[in-house]
Image (cartoon, rainbow, N blue to C red):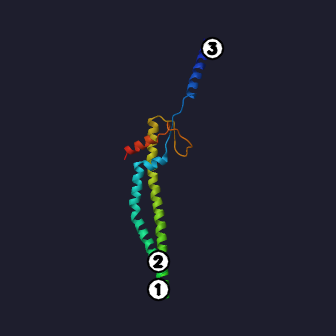
Amino acid sequence: MNTKRILFILVLTIFSVSSVAYAQPKIGFVNIAKIMEQSPQAEAARKALEREFSGRDKQLTSARDSVLKLEEKLKNDGSIMSEANRLNLERDILSKKRDYNRMRDELREDFNIRRNEELGTLQKKVYEVIQQIAKQENYDLVLTQPVLYASPSVDITDRVLKKLNATP
């Protein structure tokens, strides 16, 4: 009787372990690049950055145009100018070029900092939504890029986009 009981427990254990071993994990894939292109939050971030930096971009364009006009003046009138006027114009061009380059570098740096801040905020929101979906739909694993191949059956990108569209 005791050996039958042990044998029964052993068989029961083997069947329970084998059923766990054959359970398929639920895997999902999210195309982050698609989300960054199509989510309303990404579009809002792009527009906010555009508004924030459009004024400085116009100033930079104006500074560049000013340098180009002075260079054109030097090219056209430099040979008929007095030596002192030509030297003053060359100094002015050099000074304006330095100012332009400084403004351009500052704008790039400031833009990159703000873009990274916006991107970080967006990524945090996207990852929260991915985790919500993964928990709600009982995913064991959710992958993002780089993935060599993901079948459309495991791609949950559109569900993530739908949820992002529903949230402000």
Q: Nearer the viewer, residue 70 or 156?
A: 70
Q: Sequence-wise, which precedes: disc 2 or disc 1?
A: 2
**Position of residue 67 measured from the top left corner of the image (x, y, whole percent):** 46, 74
Q: Residue 85 — which label?
A: 1
Mark pair 1, 3: CA separation: 112 Å
Q: Which residue is mark 3?
A: 3
Residue 106's place in the image compared with 5, above or below, is below
Q: Nearer the viewer, residue 26 or 33?
A: 33
Residue type of the residue flagged with mark 1: Asn
Give the structural element (helix, strand or loop) at label 1: helix
Residue type of the residue flagged with mark 2: Glu
Q: Nearer the viewer, mark 2 or mark 1?
A: 2
Residue type of the residue flagged with mark 3: Thr
**Residue reaching furthest front?**
76
**Position of residue 52 measured from the top left corner of the image (x, y, whole percent):** 39, 61
Mark pair 3, 2: CA separation: 103 Å
Q: Residue 72 — which label?
A: 2
Residue at image point 48% right, 47% down: 32
